[in-house]
Amino acid sequence: MNILLTGAGGLVGSALAPRLAAESHTITRLSHSQPWPELAAHDAVVHLAGENISTGRWTPEKKARIRDSRVQVTRRLCEAVAKLAQPPRVVICASAIGY
């Protein structure tokens, strides 16, 4: 499968990407520093991106970044997928909000 993976550098993503690659899946890693790839070329989207919750104090500003990094990016991703004539067969979204 061609899989788009957001949050590939995070705790879960950094373990998941090699596992999927070992099973012969093609992984496209999406990061905030690069433009979004063509979504239609993917069979699946695994969305794990978000503000790191394990660094720094949870000030009101940090909490807002945690929330916004999940809500806004997930909304943009889902809106983009919804516009596709042939969307990926599956979209998986997971995000930590605490531990």
Image (cartoon, helix red, strand yellow):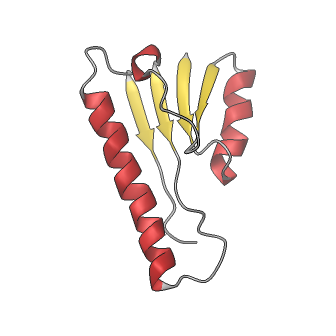
Q: Residue at x 35, y 54 (%)?
A: 72
User: Picture quarter containing residue 51?
Assistant: bottom right
| Above or below, comparing residue 95 to residue 67 in the picture | above
Query: Which residue is located at x 42 percent, y 73 percent?
Result: 64
Residue 58 position within the rendered picture, expressed as x and y whole percent measured from the top left: 54, 82
| Corner quadrant of residue 93 | top left
What is the quadrant of residue 20 in the picture?
top right
Tell me: residue 71, above or below residue 82: below
Where in the figure is residue 92, as x and y percent of width and height? 44, 38
Kindly identify the residue that appears in the image at 39 percent across and 28 percent down: 90
Left/right placement of residue 95 relative to residue 99 reads left
Front residue of 12/67: it is 67
The quadrant of the picture occupied by the C terminus is: bottom right
What quarter of the picture does the N terminus occupy?
A: top right
Q: How many marks do you count on the picture? A: 0
Q: Is residue 24 left or right of residue 53?
A: right
What residue appears at the point 33 percent right and 20 percent down from the top-left corner? Answer: 87
Q: Give the x, y percent position of residue 16.
A: 67, 38
Residue 67 image point, x, y percent: 41, 66
